[in-house]
């Protein structure tokens, strides 16, 4: 799936031709591109390093710069551009807004939600996420993994209902507080 730079400023970087390229200018290596898709007059690319880029097809083999609109999403765009520059130039990149553990939890939450929406029983979801051996190691009725799968499904629901917007804008989704009913 590709997002547009307007919808996901923390995810997609809009590139433009460099107007005054110098010796350190960056051009995109076609071998470093995993996937391409054209839409709305733009070429959307996914680099092997994971970045999502958008540019006009004619600019693909030119030295490129980053186009950062001065809008309310400026901080997310600037941070993403800094990470992109570092990776393309082989420098140490600033940290991503999400840790590896947070990314893993989001992926697991969405997988758990997909399973639940396909009417898969909790135990089968747990076996897919944690393995049959680990799930079978203790009684399912009182298993902490059962409770974890329920929490992952709830987290996946929050993400799909509202939290993904925060991620696309470069923010962490806020945790929903439990209601004491």
Image (cartoon, grey):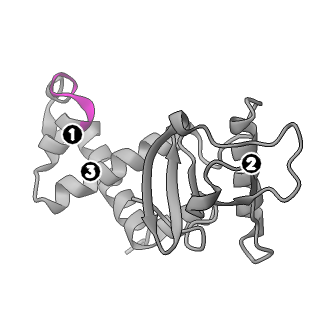
Quarter of image, res 128: top left
Q: Is residue 125 above or below residue 42?
A: above
Secondary structure mostly seen in magenta is helix
28 in the magenta segment: no
Q: Secondary structure at mark 2?
A: loop
Q: Which of disc 3 and disc 2 is earlier in sequence? A: 2
Magenta stretch contains residue 132: yes
Q: Are marks 1 and 3 in contact (CB under 8 Å)?
A: no
Work out which quarter of the rendered image holds the N terminus and state it: bottom left
Q: Residues within 10 Å of mark 3 (few under 14, many from 20)?
A: many
Give the numbered dot on residue 63. 2
Residue assigned mark 1: 126
Closest to the observer: 13 or 20? 20
Please give the label number shown on residue 67: none
- Boundaries of the magenta span: 129-134
CA gap, disc 2 to disc 3? 43 Å
- Name the N-terminal-most of marks 1 and 3: 3
The answer to which of 49 and 63 lies nearer the viewer is 63
Residue 160, quarter of picture: bottom left
Residue 73 pos. (x, y %): 71, 71
Q: Is residue 177 left or right of residue 123?
A: right
Residue at image point 44% right, 64% down? 38
Q: Quadrant of the C terminus?
A: bottom left
> In screen coordinates, is 55 left or right of 27?
left
For label 3, the residue is: 112
Q: Is residue 169 left or right of residue 27?
A: left
Q: Where residue 29 sits: x, y (%)? A: 60, 37
124 in relation to 66, above or below: above
Q: Residue at left 30%, top 56%? A: 153
- Quadrant of the image occupied by residue 65: bottom right
Badge count: 3
């Amino acid at each position: 799936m590709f997002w547009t730079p307007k919808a996901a400023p923390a995810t997609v970087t809009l590139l433009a031709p460099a107007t005054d390229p110098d010796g350190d200018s960056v051009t995109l290596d076609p071998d470093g591109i995993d996937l391409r898709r054209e839409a709305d007059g733009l070429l959307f690319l996914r680099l092997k390093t994971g970045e999502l880029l958008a540019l006009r097809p004619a600019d693909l083999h030119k030295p490129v710069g980053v186009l950062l609109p001065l809008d309310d999403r400026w901080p997310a765009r600037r941070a993403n551009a800094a990470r992109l520059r570092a990776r393309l130039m082989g420098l140490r990149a600033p940290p991503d807004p999400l840790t590896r553990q947070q990314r893993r939890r989001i992926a697991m939450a969405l997988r758990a939600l997909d399973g639940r929406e396909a009417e898969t029983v909790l135990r089968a979801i747990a076996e897919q996420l944690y393995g049959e051996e680990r799930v079978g190691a203790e009684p399912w009725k009182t298993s902490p993994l059962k409770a974890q799968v329920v929490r992952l499904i709830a987290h996946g629901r929050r993400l799909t209902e509202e939290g993904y917007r925060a991620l696309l804008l470069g923010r962490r989704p806020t945790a929903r507080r439990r209601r004491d009913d």
